[in-house]
Image: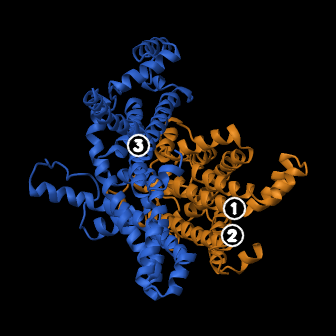
Chain colours: A orange, B blue
């Protein structure tokens, strides 16, 4: 199945762009100057000494962009992983065990599905006053799992009916062993897809949350969202929208990343979903 | 004698259908479905409201501490704290507080605003004043986005060549773009470089709105950019989804069979479209939930005078009652909206009356 992935152009293009952004964040943040180093060059447009100009405190926008992408992706990865973990636990164990466990987990998913999660997230973030990157990632993960739980649940329900699971159960295999050796390998591709989508949702949510000042503390943590926050809350210009060099780059990185993940995801879908397979 | 019996039977017969109709009403699958949904959403709403009760009580640092002005002496702090706790009923047992919470809620009492702008006005009044502005964004965007987006998506599925691809890429781009960033881009181009639209607010500053053409134009000018942002993003999402759903249906057995039978292409597309739109309706719930969150953030960018901007200001001012009140109303609106979407779905798809559980 993974050989098919390599042959899918959509997946490869998407993955290449995602990798490029990861490298940009990881390597770029080591090469550029300190993103929180302030200077007296307030809000200057791009020049040869500051390739992308400077922000409200005279900080280098390029340096902020590198560190910001790195931090945003890290928050996204932690939050996406956390959401996937909850989704697998809630959506996977329920239908496998059946009975009351299934009823409870399904009811929980149904209730949470209609919950307005972004307002809840904003409320939680607003009440917790000092927020670290980890905390924000945890909050995002804890509020973004329902759709994933539901799709994993439907996948497990179809897997459970397969003959080889019955045979494994009849031959006296322990539940845990069935899950590890029979179900997990078949679910792996699906879980990866869920993780990738969760990650992109988390990156988008983090930047939105940070933009209204409810992400990790914007004066000490640089994320793509905190860059937008300082554009909105800057004091050096009357109209923040004139600072195009401050807000276009972070949004552009976000857009390219999200579109790349989307392309990668649809490539994966074509490979993993036999009805769509054209590779 | 016989006449009497016949009359009695007649009376009985005339009564039977009446009782039968009543029984039938509750046995009717659609009514059953609606009742089940009512119970389900009442449970969801009570859980959501209980969350609103629990969250501030679980979090570290009580809101009371933040109401005490800095610079108060330790003794004064203790006495003020005790006084405030007694005033807000926080010294009572938790169960009593919970009962009071519900009693106040049912009376429409959400507490009083501490925020500077709304000094001690009831939170419920302020929230109800802002609600129409948020709904004015959410409701048109929800419907226009759904219809236009699905129409474009269905078209894009069978339009071949450059045009189809261009539409597809535009809609992918629109659906994946961060909405708040798109708002900034629109502001940069349409409000700063070309001064067509105002940059922020619901009305021009120092403008007294009235029932005349001038205020309508002013309001529409302010409305255009937030509306455009949300609509374009929503249309992009629906169009990408609808395109792949239609393609999926066009690939399925009944279409291939009909094609072999020699059906016209137009007919095939209309069949596929009709089957593709149903699953899209189930997405309307999720779209509504997303849209509320998006609107809250977009309102902050445009300083649009709705619930989201109010919540944002309440967070900045650390006004607890206002914060909880706004979120409470938002949650109730979203849950009620979800209920309406579910009922509408039941109208459209007769299958779910029997097969789908709440």
Q: Report in which chain the residue with disc 2 lies.
A: A
Q: Is residue A153 left or right of residue B113?
A: right
Query: Marks 1 and 3: CB-CB under 8 Å?
Result: no
| Closest to the observer, B63 or B249 | B249
Neighbour tally class for label 1: few under 14, some 14-19, many 20 plus, Cα within 10 Å: some
Quarter of the rendering occupied by the N terminus of chain B: top left
Q: Report in which chain the residue with disc 1 lies.
A: A
Q: Report in which chain the residue with disc 3 lies.
A: B
Label 2 residue SS: helix
Q: Which mark is residue B31?
A: 3
Q: Nearer the viewer, mark 2 or mark 3?
A: 3
Q: Which mark is residue A272?
A: 2
Q: Are the residues under badges 1 and 2 in a single subunit?
A: yes
Q: Residue at x 53, y 50 (%)?
A: B356
Q: Residue at x 55, y 60 (%)?
A: A64
Say which label, 1 or 2, has the lower sequence index.
Answer: 1
| Closest to the observer, B115 or B273 | B273
* In the image, residue B251 above or below residue B46: below
| Closest to the observer, A165 or B10 | B10
Query: Marks 1 and 2: CB-CB under 8 Å?
Result: yes
Residue B146 position, x and y percent, is: 38, 63
Label 3 residue SS: helix
Q: Are the residues under badges 1 and 3 in a single subunit?
A: no
Query: Marks 2 and 3: CB-CB under 8 Å?
Result: no
Residue B262 position, x and y percent, is: 48, 88
| Closest to the observer, B33 or A168 | B33
* In the image, residue B29 above or below residue A57: above
Q: Which mark is residue A190?
A: 1
Count of numbered labels shown in the rendering: 3
Q: Residue at x 23, y 67 (%)?
A: B196
Between the residue at mark 1 and the residue at mark 3, the CA separation in whole angstroms equals 38 Å
């Amino acid at each position: 199945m993974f050989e098919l992935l390599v042959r899918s152009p959509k997946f490869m293009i998407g993955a290449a762009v995602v990798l490029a952004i990861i490298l940009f964040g990881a390597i770029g943040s080591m090469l550029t100057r300190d993103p929180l180093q302030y200077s007296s060059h307030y809000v200057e447009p791009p020049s040869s000494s500051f390739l992308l100009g400077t922000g409200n405190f005279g900080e280098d926008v390029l340096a902020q962009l590198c560190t910001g992408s790195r931090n945003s992706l890290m928050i996204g990865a932690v939050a996406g992983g956390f959401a996937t973990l909850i989704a697998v636990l809630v959506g996977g164990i329920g239908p496998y065990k059946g009975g009351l466990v299934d009823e409870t987990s399904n009811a929980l998913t149904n209730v949470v599905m209609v919950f307005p999660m972004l307002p809840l997230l904003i409320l939680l973030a607003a009440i917790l006053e000092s927020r670290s990157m980890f905390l924000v990632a945890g909050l995002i993960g804890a509020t973004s799992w329902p759709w994933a739980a539901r799709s994993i649940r439907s996948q497990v329900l179809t897997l459970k009916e397969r003959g080889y699971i019955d045979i494994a159960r009849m031959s006296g295999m322990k539940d845990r062993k069935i899950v590890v050796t029979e179900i997990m390998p078949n679910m792996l591709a699906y879980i990866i897809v869920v993780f990738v989508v969760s990650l992109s949702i988390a990156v988008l949510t983090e930047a939105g949350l940070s933009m209204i000042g409810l992400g990790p503390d914007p004066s000490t943590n640089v994320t793509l969202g905190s860059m937008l926050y300082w554009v909105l809350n800057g004091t050096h210009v009357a109209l923040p929208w004139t600072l195009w060099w401050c807000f276009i780059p972070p949004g552009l990185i976000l857009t390219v990343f999200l579109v790349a993940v989307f392309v990668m995801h649809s490539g994966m879908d074509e490979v993993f979903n036999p009805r769509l397979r054209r590779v | 004698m016989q006449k009497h019996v016949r009359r009695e039977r007649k009376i009985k017969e005339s009564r039977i259908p009446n009782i039968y109709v009543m029984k039938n009403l509750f046995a009717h699958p659609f009514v059953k479905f609606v009742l089940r949904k009512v119970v389900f959403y009442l449970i969801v709403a009570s859980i959501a409201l209980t969350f609103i009760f629990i969250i501030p009580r679980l979090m570290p640092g009580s809101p009371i501490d933040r109401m005490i002005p800095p610079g108060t002496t330790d003794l004064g702090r203790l006495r003020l704290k005790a006084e405030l706790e007694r005033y807000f009923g926080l010294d009572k047992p938790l169960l009593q507080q919970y009962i009071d919470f519900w009693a106040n809620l049912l009376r429409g009492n959400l507490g009083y605003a501490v925020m500077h702008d709304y000094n001690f006005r009831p939170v419920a009044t302020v929230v109800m004043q802002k609600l129409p502005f948020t709904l004015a964004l959410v409701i048109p965007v929800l419907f226009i986005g759904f219809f236009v987006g699905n129409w474009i998506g269905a078209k894009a599925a069978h339009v071949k060549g450059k045009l189809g691809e261009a539409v597809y890429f535009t809609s992918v781009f629109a659906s994946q773009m961060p909405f708040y960033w798109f708002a900034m881009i629109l502001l940069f181009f349409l409000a700063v470089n070309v001064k067509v639209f105002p940059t922020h607010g619901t009305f021009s500053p120092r403008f007294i709105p009235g029932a005349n053409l001038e205020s309508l134009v002013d309001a529409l000018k302010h409305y255009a950019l937030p509306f455009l942002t949300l609509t374009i993003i929503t249309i992009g999402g629906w169009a990408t989804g609808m395109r792949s759903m239609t393609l999926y249906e066009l690939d399925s057995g009944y279409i291939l069979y009909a094609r072999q039978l020699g059906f016209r292409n137009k007919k095939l597309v209309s069949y596929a479209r009709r089957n593709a739109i149903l699953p899209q309706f189930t997405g309307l719930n999720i779209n509504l939930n997303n849209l509320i969150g998006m609107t809250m953030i977009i309102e902050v960018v445009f300083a649009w005078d709705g619930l989201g901007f109010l919540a944002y200001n309440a967070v900045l001012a650390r006004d607890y009652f206002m914060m909880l009140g706004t979120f409470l109303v938002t949650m109730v609106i979203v849950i009620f909206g979800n209920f309406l979407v579910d009922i509408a779905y039941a109208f459209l798809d007769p299958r779910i009356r029997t097969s789908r559980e709440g």
